[in-house]
Amino acid sequence: MDIKVTERELRDRIERLCKAITKRYDEWDTAVILSRVSQYYFTGTMQDGILIIKKNGEVMYFARRSYDRARIESPLACIYPMESYRDAAAAAGRELGNTLFETELLTVGILERIKKHFSIEKMYSLDNIIFEVRAIKSPYELHCMKESGKRHQKLLDEIVPSILKEGMSEVDFTAELYRHMLKIGFHGVSRFSRYQTEMIAGQIAFGENSLYHTNFDGPGGMKGMSAAVPIIGSRDRFLRKGDLVFVDIGFGMYGYHSDRTQVYMFGETPSAEVVRAHRKCIEIQKQAAELLKPGSIPSRIYESVMSGIEEEFLENFMGFGSRKVKFLGHGIGLHIDEPPAIAEGFDRPLEENMVIALEPKKGMAGVGMVGVEDTYIVTPEGGQLITGGEKDIIAV
């Protein structure tokens, strides 16, 4: 059963957005929100539409398709039908003044269509401001994410070992995994904010395929279906005894995600070398999790943890060969990849009820990717684990 956000919470989100914009651009007049995920965050519905927020707090949401569904799903009353941006301009007023857009998503074509009907003085970027507002989760959002984390734990601890079978392909495994995900409540898609990033569930690979080059900015690898569809899994890689099975997947409920990685060894016991590397990653993860407290600086967490890792272990840490990432973790919520990252350059202090996924991993030649990933809530006591991981390699 779906659950709905209240009008009071939506109004609070809009008010926090207006305050955050004013703090950065006091001269602003209008914020225009076009992305469906951001529209969902501020309205409780996800349609083809345009959300207009004025500096004085006035809100107007114009839904092209489906206006009727928007009225059913959103507790807001300020929803209007729209055939084109002309209708929105007639109702909201043509003059937008100094206007903020989600510039990472706004195409030239859409901007030109907007300019046909609206007058804009200056343009500013809204993307990072929205992420800052979204980073601090409400009790409603934390409830969704904790519930996702519980199902995620059940999936990886109990269900995955039961469906791994010798001779199955990565695609067979992914299909069976996805079926079980839906059955226990998965909302059906893993959403990413990174431009043109596609993912059904996550990165899934057998053996050396978890070291394969990807266009996705993560430490793990995945060969995928083909050059045209480098996700899901390979039809030609079949599960054999002695294979390491790498499962790095998002789960989600009501739009909100959790993120976890679990590694399995099929048909054999992992070698002492593999176990040592994996446990070192767990140690690093726990060290970083202890630092997830309000006031902590993400870049300093990264520096502190990375500086304590032995030089030898850093080889193929957070990737393999030349394909390595420069972070230890990332924010998560309506998108799996949200600010802040636990990385250099992220100097804004953490705040209570931010949610961070930590993922220390290490590539091992001829074996695959070992390591962990789990989702944590920032609390005064450190990261609160909600995905039940921090686990050794599971032998199947």
Image (spheres, rainbow, N blue to C red):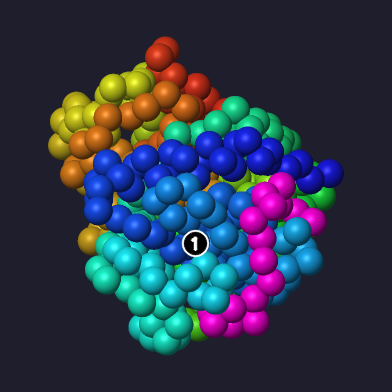
In the picture as drawn, the residue positioned furthest to the top comes out as: 381
Instruction: Determine if residue 359 is in view.
Output: no
Out of 112 and 2, give the one closest to the viewer.
112
Q: Position of residue 274 (x, y in %)?
A: 42, 38
Residue in the image at 44% along x and 19% along y: 379
- Does 112 sit above or below residue 148? below
Left or right: residue 322 versus residue 235 is left
Q: Secondary structure at mark 1?
A: strand
Corner quadrant of residue 298: top left
Front position in the image: 108 or 320: 108
In the image: residue 283, left or right of residue 375: left
Q: Position of residue 381 (x, y in %)?
A: 42, 12
Residue hosting label 1: 52
* The C terminus lies in quadrant: top right
Q: Residue at x 69, y 52 (%)?
A: 77
Instruction: Provide the residue span drawn in magenta.
Output: 72-87
Instruction: Give the x, y percent position of residue 233.
Output: 58, 67
Counting from the top left corner in percent of width and height, residue 351 is at 37, 27
Is 84 covered by the magenta stretch? Answer: yes
Above or below, 323 relative to 357? below
Q: Indicate whether 278 appears above or below 233.
A: above
